[in-house]
Amino acid sequence: MTRDEYLAYREMVAKLDPDAMERVKTKAPPVDETDFALRVSYVILNSGMKWTVAKDIWNRMRPSLVETGEVGDTFGHPGKTKSIDLVMSNRSEFFEGFRSAWKEGPEKVIDFCGALPHIGGITKYHLAKNVGVDVAKPDIWLERVASQSAETVQELCARLSRQSGDSVSTVDYVIWKTCQQGWWRAGAFPSDKLEPD
């Protein structure tokens, strides 16, 4: 994907959802242990689920988490419920671990995220983004786009970030949304088969 193609897709995404570009900028780090635990809980909930479905469940679950520190009867997935409850009950310890990792840099934060309950090899990037690291989540859509120019997802998003001035998180979202909407297809543009800049 070239810079010009990315910018054209970014314009399409912005027209589809005018507030999206503001929402997907790199997030600030969590301010306290509850903020951190809620961000982790949302990513656990969202993993392997359409975000539209997760959003509805989250709207039911979040008040219980804030009020009681537990999922309660707001969600029926036993594994995710156990992990979310564990994160909420150990939020002080996990937040301190996050703060220590933050001092050591983005890679340490990503590694720390991967060690949390119910967070896997791809999901750790989603969580890292949600706690303030400017990184891409290498999901299947982004992998497909990156493979067309023989780049990794991180290389593709970093290159387009440098070329466009957008954050890596913004580039990640634009590419994901472009694929999700069916606008991007492998080989659709001549540059899909070219070497990266």
Image: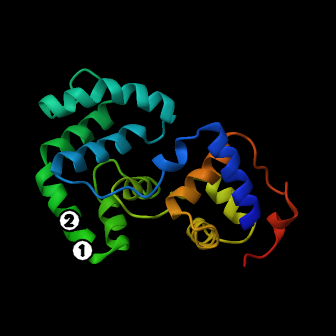
Q: For mark 1, what is the residue?
A: 103
Task: Tell me which amino acid carries mark 2.
Answer: Arg
Residue visible at 65% across and 37% down in the picture: 16
Side of 158 relative to 149 (left or right): left
Side of 3 relative to 106 (left or right): right
Side of 44 relative to 3 (left or right): left
Q: For mark 2, what is the residue?
A: 99
Residue visible at 42% across and 39% down in the picture: 46
Residue visible at 23% across and 27% down in the picture: 63
Task: Tell me which amino acid carries mark 1.
Answer: Lys
Q: Position of residue 25 (x, y in %)?
A: 46, 55
Q: Mark 2, residues whose alpha carbon is within 10 Å: few (<14), some, or many (≥20)?
A: some
The residue nearer to you, when weighing 159 against 42, is 159
Picture quadrant where residue 147 is located: bottom right
**92 to 162, vertically: above or below:** above
Indicate which disc residue 53 carries.
none
